[in-house]
Amino acid sequence: IKHVLPLFTEALKDTEDDLRNNGVYGLGELVLFGGETAVPHHEHILSILSNMLAIEQTPRVIDQIVGAIARFIMSGVPSVPVNDIVPVMFSNLPLKEDVEEYEMTFKAFGALYAAGHESMKQNIPKILECALICHTSRTVDKKLILPLVNDLVKQIAKDFPSETQTVLGGIPPEAAAKLNAILV
C-alpha cells in the first residue's frame, strides 16, 4: 500500500481525465481488497475523494468516485463511515458515463439493503431509476449487472410495495412497464 497509494493520489492531480479516472479506480480497489492494511488510510482516501468530488467536472471520473464509495461500503470494514458516504453516493446517481460502475453500485445497494440501512427506503426512487437505466442502456453488461439489479428490485417491491407503486405511478408508462416486467 505504501508504494501504490502515492501513485494513485498523484494520478488524481493530472489534467488527463483517464489518468484521474484510473487513480480513483485504483484507490477504490485498494480499499476493497486492501483489508486491514488499508484501514489506516481510509480517512485520508475519503478526504481526497471528497475534495476531488467538489471540483471534478468530468462525468466518468465522478462516476468512478461513486464506484470507489461503493467499494468502501463493500469492503465490510466496520470503521467505514457508511452514514456519511451513502448520501454522497446517492447524490451523484444516476451514473452519467461509466455505467460499468453500476455493478459495484448495485452490490453496495444489496449490502446496504441486507443490513437494513435506513438510506435504502428513502432512496427507492433513485434505486429504481438506476435499475431502469441498467435495463435500457446499450453499454451495460447485462449478463453481469441485471441479476444484481433484478434481485434488488424484486426485494424492494416485496418489502415496500406502496413505495414501489408510488414510483411506478409517477414515471412514464413505458418505464413503468419495464420495471413491472422485472417483478414478474
Image (spheres, grey):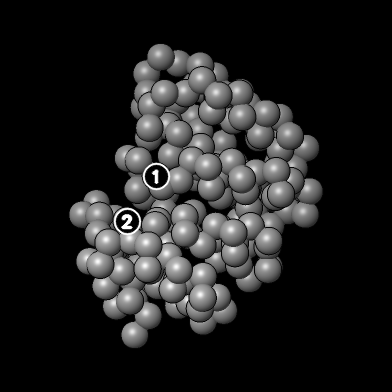
Question: What percent of the width, then of the height, locates residue 128?
Answer: 42, 62
- For residue 124, the mark is none
In the rendered view, tell whether residue 172 sits above or below residue 88: below
Residue located 68% across and 68% down the image: 116
Question: What percent of the width, then of the height, locates residue 119?
Answer: 63, 57
Q: Are marks 2 and 1 in contact (CB under 8 Å)?
A: yes
Which quadrant of the structure image shows residue 146?
bottom left
User: 57 and 36: which one is in front?
Assistant: 57
Work out whether residue 24 can be spotted: yes
User: Please, what is the three-letter code of the amino acid marked with disc 2?
Assistant: Ile
Q: Which residue carries the number 2 mark?
A: 133
Q: Is residue 86 left or right of residue 175?
A: right
Q: Earlier in the sequence, mark 2 or mark 1?
A: 1
> Badge 2: few (under 14), some or many (20 or more) residues near its Cα, within 10 Å?
some
Residue located 27% across and 61% down the image: 172
Secondary structure at numbered mark 1: loop
Q: Which residue carries the number 1 mark?
A: 95
